Amino acid sequence: MRTAPTILHLDMDAFFASVEQASKPSLRGKAVVVGGLGPRGVVATASYEARVFGVHSAMPMGQARRLVPNAAYLVPRFTFYRSISERVMELLRALSPLVEPLSLDEAFVDLEAGGVAWDERSARLAGVKLRADIRAVTGLTGSVGLAASKMLAKIASEEAKPDGLVVIEPGSERAMLGPLSVRILPGVGPATGDHLRRAGITTVEEIVEAGEDELVRLLGKAHGHGLYAMALARDDRPVVAERETKSVSVEDTYDVDIHDRTRVGLEVQRLAERCVRRLRGAGLSGRTIVLKVRRYDFSTLTRSETLRGPTDDPAVIREAAGRLLDSVDTTGGVRLLGVGVSGLADYTQEDLFAQAAGERAVAEGPVEEHTAAPAEEQPASLAERRWPAGHDVRHAEFGHGWVQGSGLGRVTVRFETPSSEPGRVRTFRVDDPDLEAADPLPLVLGGPEGGGGVPGAGSQAVSSVPASLPKSWSGSGGGAATSRP
């Protein structure tokens, strides 16, 4: 363990929902839910205004609608989110060569490796500056945790939410962790938490009191040893700059079960094509093709086939996925399909073309895309006709706006931009020739290099460290650094 809190964990606040609020003035301060809008869709992210009502990520969208019927429900714009994420990651890489992204909105940074922090004061200053830079570049807010280990830095950032900064001072870790729930520790999910609770262990301190041997007896050797070490605040994991990609996969959940075997086969072929595009986009190839099928009764089957060597050839991957499908009974209906490739490499074994027996009959172009695919991965003309809720449009007369909803041959658009006042709503025919899909506008005036934040963005700033924090913690909110007495 280090003697200074020089490991930083950044977690952007309700990232997808915050992006939507920043780009849509009429949604600021209101409940926003981003995710799949079909009957089987799930919540990707909910704004803090929606979380008050119990909405959270991975919740079925139908349940979210019952909890907050008047929220804005939007389809994700992943390409836009990725572009903003890259701006944030650039700021992190300016602090240190050791940046470990965990997702689009979350990363660890080794400040000591970058020479920008060596003690508590310099680490805090780096964290405060980072939060200010993120707001200036993106108009969004992020929460920062600083500690001597990755585990503690992540715990600190969680306590800093939303829009805050928390420092765990070295030497105070055991006292800080002791009264907290066992669920605070990495690897303790609902099942493990319930198992420990039945054994009378509900807090981190009770893990320490139970002892390492009891943890091993309850959870097994690997998990028991690891959990006991974390309860003692022992975590020597380094920040790793490059996290190896182990697999590439795509999947779709269908609003209505697919019973037709031919349709299932076409969906698998389409998914294989999408998977190949992702492989090639990452400059990778793979040896093992994996098919995932979730049936009508929620039972999930996986089948895999390992080739002689790595490939990114669409004919090979399509044919392998088709062979795997032949071994699965889909008679009762299919609600989810997925195709993945693992055993990745950065080269392709050319003689694998011979494995595709029917390659001469396969057209070189991609197979037909169906409406179950995410809107941004479909041909532009199809996406325009579907008008996904939340996506950007432009009208020849009224300018830039976003889709509030569509149906019955009509599409409703609110005309506003990130820097405007809340705009007016107008309704058009879905085939209106003056209405077209548009690219998102920058969230910050003046582009990524300048300007202040979006008006009204990041309104969840806190003025002090959360009241629940132990005295050994110190933090700041809204950019003002304070310390607990």
Image: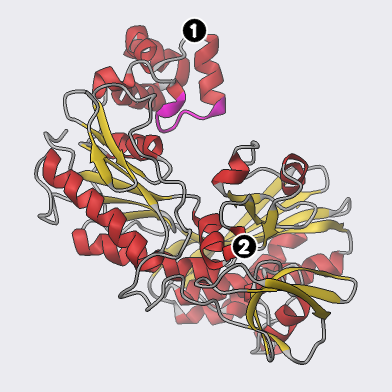
Q: How far apart are marks 1 and 2 (CA)?
A: 49 Å
Give the residue at mark 2.
Answer: 26
Give x and y (percent) for residue 133: 29, 61
Tag 2: residue type? Ser
- In this view, 90 is above or below 397: above
Q: Give the range drawn in magenta.
A: 183-190
**Residue 171 visible at all:** yes
Q: Residue 347 versus residue 44: which sits nearer the camera?
A: 44
Q: Residue 200 carries which label?
A: 1
Colour style of the rendered protein structure: secondary structure
The local secondary structure at tag 1 comes to: loop
Q: Residue 167 carries which label?
A: none
In the image, farthest residue toward the front: 421
Relative placement, left or right, of 352 versus 375 is left
Give x and y (percent) for residue 221: 38, 22
What quarter of the picture does the N terminus occupy? top left
Asked where in the image residue 289 lies, by quadrant, the reply is bottom right
Q: How crowded is mark 1: few (under 14 residues within 10 Å), some or many (20 or more)?
A: few
Relative placement, left or right, of 386 versus 167 is right
Q: Residue 260 versus residue 48: which sits nearer the camera?
A: 48
Query: Mark 1 or mark 2, which is nearer to you?
Result: 2
Give x and y (percent) for residue 222: 38, 27
What quarter of the picture does the C terminus occupy? top left
Q: Residue 394 versus residue 3: which sits nearer the camera?
A: 394
